């Protein structure tokens, strides 16, 4: 029988929280808090920073209250692969030597994700408490070390919602603003606010009824899908999967079939980023089966399924999937589907180029990326960085290390501004592959600049 966590209960009460109040602040069900207190389950790792902040306790103290070894949180940073196929390096020590944090990405209250150069020269990404990083940098002169590192207080309905608009429309407008911010600045400036908005929606749903509550559920599903994307771009794939799963549940509850299809296709994209080829193909095919015929959503499933086929080494199926997607986006749809309205031929070709690189078709990949980059809107700066970084990887094989390093340097300037782990992961992999040409001036300059925005193992 599971042991009750009396210390956790006492701490909750001391901070003035009921079970329902704590659940609402975290964005979980009351039954979830009850299970934690009865020792029948543990908070997810991405709940821990917020939970510690609400209870005004350190991460270590919270781990003690929840029984050591069961929370999934440790004193050392969590290690994630940097996109290299090489054997993983050892974990960096818990207290880094901060020479720069241009790769820092704010994930949630109390956590920051940073790139770290290990002693053997490789790059990994670690998630660390923001306070620990700021403490270790306290002796450095200058202003704020990590852009966006100061977490905003939890919003209330009075502070976020305009009195002259319905809450649903307010929240949709706020989400559109966050999406535009993400397009330009990347996830680190947006992810905390997006999660706070979900907590606000859950609070509003408790006070609503009928159609209003259903509409709020639909908006909540859109925010959850957006959170999944932000964590995906931040390189935290497990958190991205969590939010995608919640988004599917909530979109089904809201009866928004098109949103459910869209999220299913996005889950296929996430599986591709995680190199889970079979899941990418199966999820993409599922999205196509339930999508309106010959719609943008069908095309979206084809695109992400195409990359899954590339990961499996099936070039014929890959090519057929991208050809299908191109055909669908070239024909105006009258189905009324507005999800995936951004999907166009340039996006399809950019994804095809990525798959061609996976298949070893490097020259064709370089051409595809060049075309996609020229077609990108100026506001899609982060996507430009992703395409440049991926193109640099193909250029190494097709055009040589000098050209690859020059393109990678351009991508790096965008990566340090946006904090996109997708860019940094591509550059980290390329950095290792460029090591044999370290004496080439362009390569040396790129590697030194990349080195300057990484933490360093001590």
Image (spheres, rainbow, N blue to C red):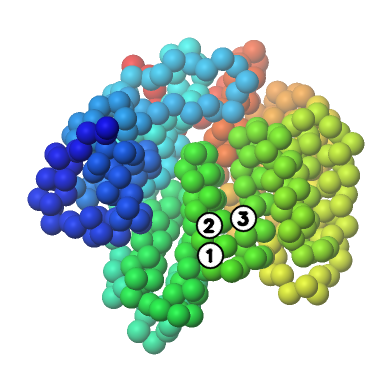
Between 260 and 33, the residue placed more toward the observer is: 33
Name the spot of residue 68 as percent of width and height, x first. Answer: 25, 27
Label 1 packing within 10 angstroms: few (<14), some (14-19), many (20+): some
Q: Which mark is residue 263?
A: 3
Q: Is residue 254 visible?
A: yes
Name the spot of residue 240 as percent of width and height, x first. Answer: 51, 45
Q: What residue occupies the far bottom of the structure in this picture?
A: 164
x 33%, y 49%: residue: 32
Name the spot of residue 454 as percent of width and height, x first. Answer: 44, 29
Place residue 96 in its image quadrant.
top left
Q: Is residue 451 visible?
A: no
x 65%, y 58%: residue: 262
Q: Residues at badges 3 and 2 in contact (C-beta under 8 Å)?
A: no
Place residue 386 in its image quadrant.
top right
Name the spot of residue 72 as percent of width and height, x first. Answer: 35, 31
Q: Residues at badges 2 and 1 in contact (C-beta under 8 Å)?
A: yes
Using the image, determine if residue 20 lies above or below residue 429. Answer: below
Mark nearest the camera among 1 and 3 is 1
Using the image, determine if residue 380 lies above or below residue 450. Answer: below
Q: Which mark is residue 253?
A: 1
How far apart marks 1 and 3 lie (CA) works out to 14 Å
Mark nearest the camera among 3 and 2 is 2
Which residue in the structure is indicated by mark 2? 249
Looking at the rendered structure, the secondary structure element under dot 2 is helix
Looking at the rendered structure, the secondary structure element under dot 3 is helix
Looking at the rendered structure, the secondary structure element under dot 1 is helix
| Sequence-first tag of 1 and 3 | 1
x 38%, y 77%: residue: 208
| Sequence-first tag of 3 and 2 | 2
């Amino acid at each position: 029988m599971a042991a009750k966590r009396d210390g956790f209960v006492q701490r909750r009460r001391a901070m003035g929280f009921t079970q329902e109040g704590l659940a609402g602040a975290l964005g979980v069900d009351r039954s979830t808090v009850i299970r934690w207190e009865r020792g029948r389950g543990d908070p997810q790792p991405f709940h821990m920073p917020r939970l510690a902040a609400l209870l005004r306790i350190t991460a270590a103290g919270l781990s003690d209250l929840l029984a050591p070894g069961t929370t999934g949180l440790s004193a050392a940073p969590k290690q994630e692969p940097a996109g290299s196929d090489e054997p993983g390096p050892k974990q960096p020590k818990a207290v880094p030597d901060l020479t720069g944090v241009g790769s820092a990405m704010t994930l949630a209250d109390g956590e920051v994700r940073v790139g770290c150069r290990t002693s053997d020269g490789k790059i990994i990404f670690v998630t660390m408490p923001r306070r620990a990083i700021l403490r270790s940098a306290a002796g450095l002169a200058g202003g704020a070390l990590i852009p966006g590192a100061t977490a905003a207080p939890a919003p209330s309905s009075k502070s976020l919602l305009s009195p002259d608009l319905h809450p649903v429309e307010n929240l949709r407008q706020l989400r559109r603003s966050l999406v535009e911010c993400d397009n330009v600045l990347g996830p680190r400036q947006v992810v905390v606010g997006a999660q706070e908005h979900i907590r606000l929606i859950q609070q509003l749903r408790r006070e609503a009824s009928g159609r209003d509550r259903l509409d709020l559920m639909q908006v909540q599903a859109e925010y959850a899908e957006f959170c999944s994307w932000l964590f995906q771009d931040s390189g935290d794939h497990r958190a991205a999967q969590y939010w995608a799963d919640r988004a599917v549940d909530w979109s089904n509850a809201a009866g928004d079939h098109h949103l459910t299809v869209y999220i299913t296709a996005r889950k296929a994209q996430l599986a591709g980023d995680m190199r889970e080829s079979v899941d990418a193909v199966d999820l993409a095919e599922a999205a196509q089966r339930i999508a309106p015929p010959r719609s943008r959503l069908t095309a979206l499933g084809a695109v992400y399924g195409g990359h899954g086929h590339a990961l499996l080494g099936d070039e014929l199926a890959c090519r057929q999937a991208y050809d299908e997607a191109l055909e669908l986006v070239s024909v105006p749809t009258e189905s009324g589907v507005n999800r995936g309205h951004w999907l166009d031929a340039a996006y399809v070709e950019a994804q095809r180029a990525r798959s061609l690189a996976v298949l070893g078709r490097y020259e064709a990949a370089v051409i595809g990326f060049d075309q996609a980059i020229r077609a990108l809107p100026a506001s899609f700066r982060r996507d430009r960085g992703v395409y440049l970084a991926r193109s640099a990887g193909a250029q190494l094989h097709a055009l040589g290390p000098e050209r690859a390093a020059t393109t990678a340097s351009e991508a790096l300037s965008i990566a340090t501004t946006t904090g996109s782990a997708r860019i940094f992961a591509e550059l980290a992999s390329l950095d290792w592959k460029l090591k044999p040409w370290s004496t080439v001036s362009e390569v040396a300059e790129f590697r030194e600049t990349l080195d300057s925005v990484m933490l360093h193992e001590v």
